[in-house]
Image (spheres, helix red, strand yellow):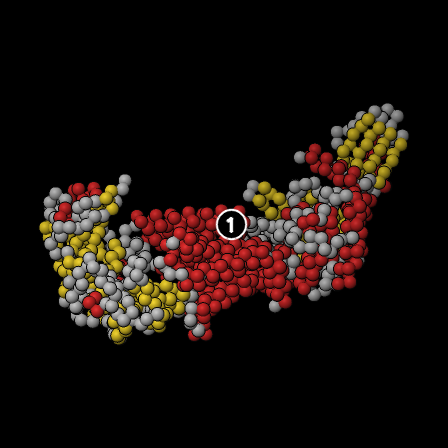
Amino acid sequence: MTSAIHTESLVKKFRRVDALQGLSLSVPQGAVYALVGPNGAGKTTAIKILMNIIRATAGRAEVLGIDSSRIRGHHFQPIGYVSENQQLPEWMTVGALLSYLRPFYPAWDAKLEDELIKQFDLPRDRKLRHLSRGMRMKAALASSLAYHPKLIVLDEPFTGLDPLVRDELIQGLLDRAEESTIFVSSHDLAEIETFASHIAYLEQGKLRFAEELTALANRFREVELTFDAPPNLPQKLPDNWLQLNTAAAIVRFTDCRFDLERSTADVRAVFGEPRNVTFSPMSLRSIFLAMAKSARNSD
Amino acid sequence: MKQIWTILRKDARHHWPEIAASLAILATFAWAEIYSWTHSRNAAYASFSLLTASFLPGLVNALVPLSWIFLIVRVVQGEPLVGDRQFWVTRPYDWKVLLAAKVLFIVTFINLPCFAMDAFLLARAGFHPAHYVVGLLWMQLMWILFICLPAGALASVTRTIPQMLLALLLVALFMIGMIALSQVIPNSNFSSGSDWWTGFLFIATTVTIILLQYSRRRTAAARWLIAGLFAALALIMVLTPYRSLIARAYPLSQGDVPVEVKLLPAQTNRGSYYDQGGEVSIQLPLSISQLPKDTFVDLDGMIATLTNANGVRWDSGWTVQARNFFADSQSAEISFQVDRRIFDQLKSAPVSAHLLLAFSTYHDTNQRQFVVPQGEFQMPDVGLCSASGPAYFHSIRCRTPLRRPRFLLITSDMASSTCPWDKQDSPAPPGLLAHDSVRYGDSDPAEMGISPLHEVDIYLSDWNTLGTRFSNPGICPGTPLTLSNPEFVGRSRVELQINNLSLTDYKRGSGKITFR
């Protein structure tokens, strides 16, 4: 499978701040790829480089096979980009915005435009400046979906939106997921979890990991060991055990390389035979909290 | 082309209030212009008319380019080039298309209306616009080069109107600085010698900034370019070898002097003058001779070097004189300012003065007679004229289309004036010639301006030489004039060595008026 987005050792420095420190990732075509991480992790910077809004200090990136630093003009015809920070022409009505953009896209689908207007419940005759934040995001998304983009890039699209609007946006995206690659940045893990197929975690400009969401979910387990008496913790623990803590005769930790046989063997090797061992699947949010805390502690 | 049209239509819809305001101001300008033709200058001094005939046109004159600049800024900033949040940068905008749409907008809503208004004014003034299309287009080109381009360049490196105002403030400060600099750099006011280069640099830089911003959106680099342009212009002003350029332009005469000038004795009554505090005005009366008939010279500038016996030396640097010496002129006065401190050092004893006079010589050609008709008349080379007066003086006021003539000399025998003589004045004897000239030295097809019409006043000066003064009654219907088109012959420098010059004798103004 070829990549819709591919970056190699992408570096971006803002004076003394290293916003990106060698980001390398590959977004497969057809994926719903989520770039997640805390605020200031470098997600928006990465996306701006991909969209050629800013230039990388070093490294390279390709978007739909085009060097991102060369992306301009007609290269944007198969790309839909929506950002929470984007400044739309707010003096325009929703209808005027769509009418204005129509001639720029040969693949503009007027029928789809009508469907999106209905789906998002957008008032055509209302000026963008008079719309709520959520409605503006929906208008921006509608204007970026109506031409069947091959790649949809969304930068923090759900920030500050109420759950209903989020659901509408996500549904709107999912309806087009079959024909597009979706690359979305967010720190809203609960929402991402519902529709992302791939996930990459960026922290302080560094990519901590990037993989398919199902693989990630399979790889992480919350492990709870119950002993008859409080166990002695050995000096050295396996490095895939994160956030280990004890409470009386119970030991909890996150196993970030879960494999039932190997993980069971690791527990036995370290603790012998606990009275009870449970491996519980983790939510994306729990996984990232564990990752983030672990990274913070190791720093 | 479709995208250009789409963007243009969007901009026109968005900026219609600014467009309407700009067109209204332009229409007001046209109205004020026509109003000024139909209300004579004399009426302008009536209390109400002063507002309408003098203040209003001045205000509208300033408002027209300001409204254009505002419109350009608004339309360029409609798709901001500064920042990284504008929606259009991630849309299929081709920068060339976007730039073309903006250019088309400016041409459509600034140049075309201005062109149409100019054509209308020409027609209204009695000139067929079809005969002046090249000049009208030239005027629009000048607006594009010197208003639209710089306004567009500044708009492309700013994001908002306040930012633009700040940029304009910086530009104004720079211009004030340049003017102040020109005052302290010797010779710079006589000949910059670098106008072409500065003009080229200015236009090239603004074009580069616009292209850089539209193609790459390199705001920091574009702003540095502006700073670089300012620095380069200042450096050009400081580093231009004015003296060498002037010396090259005005080669020293080797025997074949265009005019013989000699110092005349100091006059007893040298009039009053405004004491400029730190400077003393020295006025030297000169006799003029050996100017061939049909030849005259312009004294473009001069440089005075004063030396006294103690070795104190002072040099005026090249100063602008702008005086005409005609074959019938017998004398003229030249003046220069001396620093009071230097004057005080030199005044006690005679000094040696070395004057270098820069002349342009002209041969008076194509002489023809012209008798001023009644009412409105067509004056050759000028335009539509009428003899006006008599509130202040009798003269001819003309409206000339696009540009003043390259050089038109008007000569009249004062005794042949048909205007009534003032009883207090003694009539001039026949043979005393009064002159005026209308000239626009450049060969451009039009002068830069909002209006295609230029008002030209032809006024014949008094005949005044060394104590003998005859008031000129002026030009009235029936006054015979000699019109001619002087041809430039050449430039030269003439040296005049004056020994034992008593500066005190030639100091201007016995009864001075002092403002401190």
- Give the residue type at disc 1: Met
Residues B431 and B186: in front is: B431
Residue A83 visible in this rendered orientation of the protein: no
Q: Quadrant of the N terminus of chain B?
A: bottom right
Residue B121: x percent and y percent?
45, 67
Residue drawn at (55%, 43%), measured in percent from left and top?
A15
Decide: is B300 above or below A281: below
Residues B429 and B238: in front is: B429
As drawn, the residue found furthest toward the right would be A275
Residues A232 and B504: in front is: B504
* Residue located beneath label 1 in the image: B164
Q: How many marks?
A: 1
Q: Secondary structure at mark 1?
A: helix
Residue drawn at (69%, 35%), measured in percent from left and top?
A296
Residue B105: x percent and y percent?
56, 62
Decide: is B498 above or below B397: above
The reply, left or right, for residue B198 in relation to residue A77 is left
Q: Quadrant of the C terminus of chain B?
A: top left
Residue drawn at (49%, 47%), measured in percent from left and top?
B166
Residue B123: x percent and y percent?
45, 70
- Circle 1 Cα neighbour tier, 10 Å, few/some/many (<14 / 14–19 / ≥20): many
As drawn, the residue found furthest toward the front would be B423
